[in-house]
Image (cartoon, coloured by chain):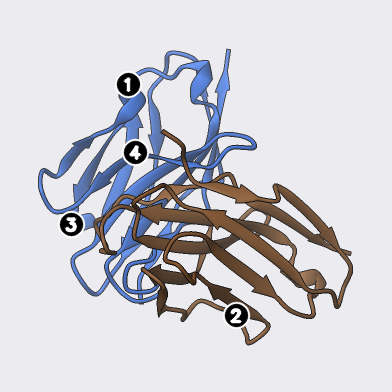
Chain colours: A brown, B blue
Amino acid sequence: GAGVSQTPSNKVTEKGKYVELRCDPISGHTALYWYRQSLGQGPEFLIYFQGTGAADDSGLPNDRFFAVRPEGSVSTLKIQRTERGDSAVYLCASSYLAGGPADTQYFGPGTRLTVL
Amino acid sequence: AQSVTQLGSHVSVSEGALVLLRCNYSSSVPPYLFWYVQYPNQGLQLLLKYTSAATLVKGINGFEAEFKKSETSFHLTKPSAHMSDAAEYFCAVSGGSGGGADGLTFGKGTHLIIQP
């Protein structure tokens, strides 16, 4: 079956612009996660959704970052007033159960964001 | 807070030789531990996970890992390396703070190089 998909695969923007990154989880998966992976680093947790609500947004670096999941399926990560330090690969993952530390998370291929 | 340390950002082995990738964790609660592999331009793929059942966990592609609580380790091994094993490997922990309650906290990764 189809895995987690993310669009766009690459996004180049200018400093100060607004960007939206989209994640389509595996059908039927109720939990959805966003991570950020900087060059040479492991992924870093940003936010976790259980259904439509953000169950944990403790990883969002500041208030320029925001994510939504209005219908409990597709999620959008929104970044306002982008900065060069936001350049990274943004990964999305989903899991079948309603969240749980033992759940297997299935990752998408990521969106590479470059802020010039 | 929980954390993961992967010793060796790069590991090089000959084809057919033993693969050993090291992972040590820190967690204030009983951990759930994961190994993911990332091939170039692809998403993270789960190799195996430890969820407090058997301490020796077998995964895909001939990999296995042993949970050793006394050493706070979860090293990944494969008896005989294959050229197709060349990739980036990440150890991760969940079940506590630092990655969200259910998010993953990753190590920095180990790049596995297979010499012909």
Depth check, front residue: B78 or A105:
A105
The numbered disc on residue B79 is 1
Pointer 2: residues within 10 angstroms few (<14), some, or many (20+)? few
Give the residue type that dot 4 points to: Leu
Q: Is residue A83 visible?
A: yes
Please state, as top left, top right, bottom left or bottom right, where the C terminus of chain A lies in the image.
bottom right
Residue at which label 2 appears: A61
| Dot 3: element | helix
* Quarter residue B43 falls in: top right
* Above/below status of A91 relative to A66: above
State yes or no: discs 3 and 2 in contact (Cβ < 8 Å): no
Q: Is residue B104 visible?
A: no
Depth check, front residue: A89 or B29:
A89
Q: For marks 3 and 1, give the CA distance.
A: 23 Å
The numbered disc on residue A4 is none
Residue at which label 4 appears: B76
Residue at which label 3 appears: B69
Residue at (35% x, 54% y) in the render: A29
Give the residue type that dot 2 points to: Pro
Q: Earlier in the sequence, mark 3 or mark 1?
A: 3
> In the rendering, at what x and y percent does residue A94 appear?
41, 54
Residue at (75% x, 63% y) in the render: A87
